[in-house]
Image: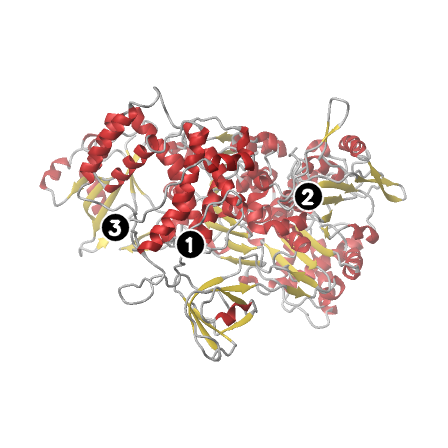
Amino acid sequence: MLPNKRAGGDEVVVAVEEEKGTVHTPISKKQCLIACTIASATTAAATTGNSKSTAAAAVSTTATENYASSGGGISESPDMTLSNGNPLDIDEDLHSRQLAVYGRETMRRLFASNVLVSGMQGLGAEIAKNLILAGVKSVTLHDEGVVELWDLSSNFIFSEDDLGKYRALVSVQKLQELNNSVVISTLTTELTKEQLSDFQAVVFTDISLEKAIEFDDYCHSHQPPISFIKSEVRGLFGCVFCDFGPEFTVFDVDGKDPHTGIIASISNDSPAFVACVDDERLEFQDGDLVVFSEVHGMTELNDGKPRKVKNARPYSFSIDEDTTSYAAYQKGGIVTQVKQPKVLNFKPLREALNDPGDFLLSDFSKFDRPPLLHLAFQALDKFIQELGRFPVAGSEDDAQKFISLLTDVNNSSADGRVEGVDQKLLRHFASGSRAVLNPMAAMFGGIVGQEVVKACSGKFHPLYQFFYFDSVESLPTEPLEPSDLKPLNSRYDAQISVFGSKLQKKLEDAKVFIVGSGALGCEFLKNVALMGVCCGKQGMLTITDDDVIEKSNLTRQFLFRDWNIGQAKSTVAASAAALINPRLNIEALQNRASPESENVFDDTFWENLNVVINALDNVNARLYIDQRCLYFQKPLLESGTLGALCNTQMVIPHLTENYGASRDPPEKQAPMCTVHSFPHNIDHCLTWARSEFEGLLEKTPTEVNAYLTSPSEYISSMMNAGDAQARDTLERILECLEKERCETFQDCITWARLRFEDYFANRVRQLTYTFPEDATTNNGTLFWSAPKRFPHPLLFSVDDLSHLHFITAASVLRAETFGISIPDWVKSPKKLADAVNKVVVPDFQPNKNAKIVTDEKATSLSTASIDDAAVINDLAMKLENCQKHLQPGFKMNPIQFEKDDDTNYHMDLIAGLANMRARNYGIPEVDKLKAKFIAGRIIPAIATSTAMATGLVCLELYKVLDGGHKVEDYRNMFANLAGPFFSMAEPVPPKVIKHQDMSWTVWDRWIVRDNPTLRELIQWLQKKGLNAYSISFGSGLLYNSMFPRHRDRMDKKVVGLVRGVLKAELPPYRRHFDVVVACEDDADNDIDIPQISIYFR
C-alpha cells in the first residue's frame, strides 16, 4: 500500500450495518485498523445467486495507519505542512503530473471531498479507481449484490474466487492499494436518500429511474446541493446525466492560464486601440476582461480595473474606454486576461427527462442518435420494472417488447417526439443491454470520474446535462445468430452476449504487441485481460518497456504500488495483468522498440502479429513503430493524452493513412539571444536555468572526465575540430580544473557566491553598459523596446532567504561533482550566512569590447576567431600543466538532472537560477512546483483521460480482430474532458498513386523473391512499365544508369552487391533487405513506387 500522503484526524468513522440500518460510530485508529482487517476477510452470504441480499456488514476501511509490532502502537507519518504552516499539504513528488492539470487549490478541494459510488459492476469499479487515484478524501462503495461470473467481463477487481461475495466488500482491499490516503467505506444495504447528505457528490451506475428521480430531487434541493450523476453502460450504448444543483459555480471553465500580451502601443482615442508585439498571437476574444500593468506614460491604465475587449485581432484589440485625456503611451506594458467564474443552472432529472435541452454530441454522423437513445434508456428501465430482468440476448420477443415500450414513451412525449425510429439499432440495444463491456466501462469511467472532479472542485466546465454514446460499428460484420450469443458459463459471457462466441475466439487467439507499459499501457493491459485478448491457446501478448517505476507514476499507472518503485514497468505490469485474468498469455520485455532491438523484434515476430497497440509518450518512438507497422502491414492503434485532452487514431492497412502521414507543427523555440540576454517571460528564464544547470553540473564534468581519461586523444580531437565550440569547451575544462576547482566545502560556497555575482549582477551590468536604457537601434528606435525588458542587477544579501537558498543548492551540487562531503550546518541559515560572508567578491569592471549576441537567428553564442587554433594550442598546454597538480585518479561526478526528487537540490537550483534572473528583468517569479513543470518539461497527466482513450481504442480493437470492417466503420477521436468536448470522425484514407492499370498506397511493399540478379530486378520492373535508373541500399548506390561501370554488375546477385560493394552486414535473422528504386515511365515522368523487398533466403 502507498505511503501516507495526508495526515488523518484523531478519529475515523466506521460504518457498521445492522438489520435496521447503518450507524456511525467514532472509534480509535487502532480499533479501525483491526476492524479493517476483519472486513477484508468478510464474505457474503452463501446464497450466490441472490443479487439483492441485505445481510452483510459494511465496514469503513482505511490503510493510512500501520500497526507497529513493538508495543502494538500506531506508526504515523509526520504532518506535512505548507510554507505558511497550513497542514494537509500535497505530496508534490507523487502528484506532480496531476498538479500540472489541476493546480494546488483544486487538489485541496478534492482532498476534502466525500464521494458515493453506487453500483460496483465494471463501470462503478472504473469510476472508483479514477477517483481514488485522483485523491478524494473518501469513497463509499454501495452495492447490494454479489459477484457473478457475468461481472468478470468488465470488473478488474473481481476474480473467480470472489463469486458469491458482496461486490462492495470484495472491492475494498484492491481499491485501497491504489491510494491509502483515501478512506474507502462500503454499504451493502438499501440506500436511503438521507444518507446522501454525507457526500459532496453521488454517482449511480445501476439504479432504477424512479429511484434516481427520488434521489436527485433530494440532492437538488439539499443545502448545499449535492452533485448527482447517473451513468449507465448497456452493451455498446452508454449515457451520463449530471445535475450539480440549481446554481453551480464553475471557478475555472477551461483550466488554462490567463492569456497575456506584450503591449507595443496604445492610442489616445475612444475606443482606445491597443497593439501588441507580434511575438505571439493574442488569444483574446470579444467580451474578455483584461487588466493592464507596467504601462509607461499612460499610467491611468495601471489601476487594476478590468476592461472589456472588443474587435479582437491576432495582434491587436480595442477597449471600450476614452483615453483621449490620458497621458501619451511611452513604452512597456502587459495585458492579462481576467478569468471569470460561470454559474450553471441545472435542471433536476424529473424535469430534464421531458425537456433534455441540447445533447452533447460526440459523432456528428449520428446527430439524430441522442434523442432516440434518450428514449431507449427510459424504455429499458420500464422493461426491467415490468419483467424484473433485462432482455435476453438475441431474443426477438424481448426486442419487440422493448420496441413497444419505447414507442409508448415516444408517443407520450409532449414536444420531443422522435420520428423515424431505427428498429435495427434498437434490437442491438435490447440484445446487449445486460452486458457491461470493459471498453465502455473504461471510457465512461473516465468521463464520469472527471465529472465528479468538476463537481467537487469547480474546475472545468461540467457536462450539461445528458450525454449519449454508442459504438454499434464495433459489432462483427457478419450477422449474429441467437445461438452464438448464448452464455458458455465463462468469464466472457457478458461480452459473448454482445459479440458472439466466434469473435470471442478470435480475441483469445490474437497475437498482440503493446509498446509501453506506463499509464496507457497499464490501462490497456487491464482492458485486454478482461476482454480475453490473448487468453486462448494460440494467443500471445508481448509488452515491452525499458523504463522503471517512479513514485510520480503511482497516481495514474494503477497496476503499480509503492513497493514496485525501481522495478521494471513491463514485468510488474504483466504480473498484475495476469492476476486480473490468469489465462492471459503474456511475455514482458525490457527492450526499447528501436532499430537497435530489431534482433529481438525481428521479421518473424512482426509477421506473426495481428495488431500493435501503442502506449508511448513521445513522437519519435511512435513514428518508428508506425514505420514498422507500415512495412509489415499491421494495424496500429494509436492514442495519446495531455492533461484533460486525449486522442485516438486508427492506422489500418490499406484503409487509412499512417500515423506519420500528418505531423503537428514544431513548437516555437525562443531565439538563443532572447533566452540568454533578453528574456521577457518566466519560460525564457527557466530554459536558461536548465541550460546552465546541465552545462555546469553535467556537460563540463563529463568533458573533464573525457579529457582526464585520455588527454592526448582528447586534445587531438579538439585541435582537429579547431572551431569556436572546441575552444569554449577547453576553456570550461581549464576553468573547472584550475580557477574554479573546489577542494573544501568552503570552496564550493565561494564558487556559488561568485556565480551569483556573475549571473545576476556582473552580466547585467555589462549588458546595460553595452546597451544603456536610452540606446537606440540603427533605425532610431529604442533598443529596449517591447518585448525586451530593461534589467537591473541584484545586490546580494544574506538576509534574503532566496539568495541563501540559491547558495545552498549551488554549493551542495558543486560539492557533489567534486566528491566533497556536505556538512550538516549547510541547512542552518546563520552558519551558511557566516560562511558566505567570508567570500571576497571582486569589483566589477565593464568590458568596452564585449560582444553580446542580438541576432535572433543566431544558433550559438560562441563567436569564431582566426586565432581559434592558436588559442586551442595554448589551452592544451595549460591543461597539461594543470593536470600535474591533480590527485592521481581524480575524476568528477557529473550530475544528471532529475526533476522528481525534491531532496536532491536539482529543482532548488533551477528555480533559484530562474527566479533570480526573473527578478533582474522584472518578470513574475514562480514557485518550485511551477518551475518543475516548465524546466522539467513535465507532461500533464490524469487517470481519467487515460482511461477514456484506452476504452475508445479497445472498442476499435473489436473491429480490427474481427476483420472485414470498412474504413467508415472505424473512428478516430479527439476529446477534451475539461470542455467537455468529443469529436469522432472516420480516419483519412491513404493517398493513392496510379500507374497504367496499377495503383498503390504507402501501405504497399513490392516483394521480389528467389534472390534476383540486378538484371532480373530491372526486368521485373520493366514488365510493370517502369524504367529503373537508380537503385540504392541505405545511403549506398547499387546502380545508376549514368555510370557505365555499373553495367558490369548486371548479372550479379543484388545481395552480393550489398555485401561486396557496400560492405553491408545482413544479420542472420534477416531473410530480406530493402532497396529504394527511382523509376520513370516511358514518357520520362518520374514515378514514386513502393519500397522493394528482396528475399535472398
Where residue 1074 appears, x then y in whole percent? 29, 39
Asked whether the viewer can see residue 593, the reply is no
From this view, report whether residue 741 is shown above or below residue 247: above
Q: Is residue 18 left or right of residue 4?
A: right
Asked whether the viewer can see residue 1082, the reply is yes
From this view, report whether residue 555 is shown above or below residue 399: above
Counting residues from the start of the chain, the first of labels 1 and 2 encountered is 2
Instruction: Identify the element where label 2 is drawn.
Output: loop
Q: Which residue is mark 2?
A: 87
Instruction: Identify the element where label 3 is drawn.
Output: loop
Q: Work out which quarter of the rendered image holds the N terminus and state it.
A: top right
Q: Is residue 209 left or right of residue 98?
A: right
Q: Which residue is mark 1?
A: 792
In the picture, residue 1018 is in which quadrant? top left
Say if mark 1 contacts mark 3, CB within 8 Å.
no
Where residue 127 appears, x then y in whole percent? 66, 47
Determine the residue positioned at 43% across, 27% down.
744
Distance in Å between CA atoms under marks 3 and 2: 55 Å
Give the amino acid type for the residue marked by disc 3 in the picture: Asn
In the picture, residue 500 is in which quadrant? top right
Q: Which residue is mark 3?
A: 849
From this view, report whether residue 74 is shown above or below residue 960: above
Distance in Å between CA atoms under marks 1 and 3: 21 Å
Counting residues from the start of the chain, the first of labels 1 and 3 encountered is 1
State the residue in front, 810 or 1003.
810
